[in-house]
């Protein structure tokens, strides 16, 4: 994949070699949002081609789809440089695209949205009407206190404790193991295939189309995770019962206080497996990374997933926005 030239700007391919570059700029922007890591974008990049450029001393990540440019993140770097870079990026997208309709910046953290608005119109609020831009609230990330997820104390977590206890009682010979690609790779892919087939059996009809659209991205993300596991600095956990992988989960450190769970899959037929591996993985993330918060990402608009994530009593919801230009 070659570079892309738009006016005076050169856009380089967003591949595994871009990790070191992006990480340097991510370190300057300390946010809890799960999207602000290299792996979170690299793994799930399947519906287009990624490019990046350094603009106004920020890392600018673009998605090229059918010739049209958009951004999957706002410019990443020191906050003092981000807003001006966003304005340049909008102009760059407009110069490339067949219509300004395609120019947008997605997954903008609420802090950056506030800074962007204040820079344009002093004293304006997020939901005010802006003269040149439309800002739309999309999904939210679910953030939890790590100790809450490990200890599961109180009545609100009683069902989680019961499910875990039943799992351990029924499966006393289960094995927890640190994810090893060579050892577990084939079993993980088999579990993903089973998960997709099982999920389709119970998927609400109104969510089926969106789910089918996402299956391709799911499989690509898992395959990329296995291929570049070490290079991405990921950590993972696998649960095996009678020699078969029944669950796996993968995560990473987002910043000094927060780790995220990027992928988690368990066998639907093993009661309590999802609750058990989640608790044990949070314990590993908290201990290995010395973090106090766990981000499990957003719910992708699925109502069932939203209910599950709310049932764990998030300590905070982190809104994410899309910015469009008004035409």
Image: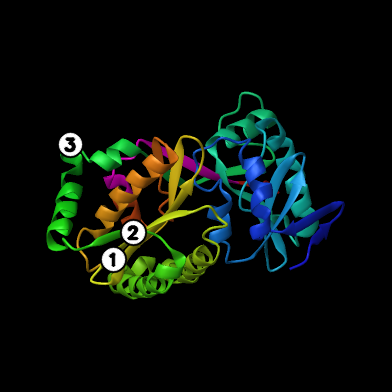
Judging from the image, what secondary structure is the residue with disc 1 in? strand
Distance between the Cα atoms at labels 3 and 1? 29 Å
The reply to whether callout 2 and callout 1 are in contact (CB within 8 Å) is yes
Q: Quadrant of residue 177?
A: bottom left
**Residue 204's mark?**
none
Mark nearer the viewer, 3 or 1: 1
**Residue 177's mark?**
2
Mark nearer the viewer, 2 or 3: 2
Q: Where residue 12 sits in the image (x, y, percent)? A: 75, 58
Distance between the Cα atoms at labels 2 and 1? 8 Å
Q: Mark 1 points at which residue?
A: 240
Q: Residue at x 31, y 52 (%)?
A: 278
Is residue 28 visible in the rendered image? The answer is: yes
Q: In which quarter of the image is residue 195?
A: bottom left
Density class for disc 3 (Cα within 10 Å; few <14, some 14-19, many ≥20) is few
Judging from the image, what secondary structure is the residue with disc 3 in? loop
Q: Where residue 134 sits in the image (x, y, percent)? A: 61, 43
Density class for disc 2 (Cα within 10 Å; few <14, some 14-19, many ≥20) is few
Viewer-proximal residue among 49 and 96: 49
Viewer-proximal residue among 199 and 182: 182
Q: Mark 3 points at which residue?
A: 154
Compare marks 3 and 1 and give the one earlier in the sequence: 3
The reply to whether callout 3 and callout 1 are in contact (CB within 8 Å) is no
Q: In which quarter of the image is residue 232?
A: bottom right
Residue located farthest toward the right when viewing the structure as drawn: 8
Residue 200 vertical placement versus 35 (above, below): below
The reply to whether callout 2 and callout 3 are in contact (CB within 8 Å) is no
Q: Where residue 153 sits in the image (x, y, percent)? A: 20, 37
Q: Which residue is drawn at 58% across and 32% down?
A: 114
Q: Where residue 59 sits in the image (x, y, percent)? A: 70, 45
Q: What stretch is highlighted in magenta?
A: 309-322
């Amino acid at each position: 994949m070659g570079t892309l030239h738009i006016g005076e700007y050169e856009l380089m391919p967003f591949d595994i070699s871009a990790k070191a570059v992006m990480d340097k700029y991510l370190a300057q922007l300390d946010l809890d949002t799960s999207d602000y890591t290299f792996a979170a974008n690299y793994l799930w990049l399947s519906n287009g081609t990624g490019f990046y450029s350094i603009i106004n001393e920020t890392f600018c990540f673009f998605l090229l789809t059918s010739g049209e440019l958009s951004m999957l993140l706002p410019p990443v770097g020191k906050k003092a440089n981000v807003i001006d870079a966003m304005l340049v990026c909008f102009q760059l997208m407009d110069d490339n695209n067949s219509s300004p309709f395609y120019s947008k910046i997605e997954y903008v953290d609420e802090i950056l949205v506030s800074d962007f608005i204040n820079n344009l119109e002093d004293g304006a609020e997020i939901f005010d009407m802006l003269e040149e831009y439309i800002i739309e609230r999309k999904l939210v990330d679910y953030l939890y206190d790590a100790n809450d997820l490990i200890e599961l104390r109180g009545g609100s977590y009683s069902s989680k404790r019961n499910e875990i206890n039943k799992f351990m009682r029924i499966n006393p010979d289960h094995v927890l193991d640190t994810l090893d690609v060579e050892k577990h790779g084939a079993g993980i892919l088999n579990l993903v295939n089973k998960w997709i087939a099982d999920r389709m059996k119970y998927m609400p009809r109104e969510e089926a189309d969106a789910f089918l659209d996402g299956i391709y991205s799911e499989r690509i993300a898992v395959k990329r995770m296995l291929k570049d596991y070490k290079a991405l600095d990921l950590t993972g956990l696998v649960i095996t019962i009678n020699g078969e992988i029944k669950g796996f989960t993968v995560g990473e450190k987002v910043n000094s206080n927060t780790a995220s769970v990027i992928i988690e899959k368990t066998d639907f037929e093993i009661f309590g497996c999802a609750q058990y591996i989640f608790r044990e993985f949070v314990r590993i993330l908290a201990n290995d990374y010395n973090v106090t918060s766990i981000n499990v990402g957003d719910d992708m608009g699925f109502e069932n997933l939203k209910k599950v994530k709310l049932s764990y009593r998030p300590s905070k919801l982190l809104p994410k926005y899309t910015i469009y230009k008004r035409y």
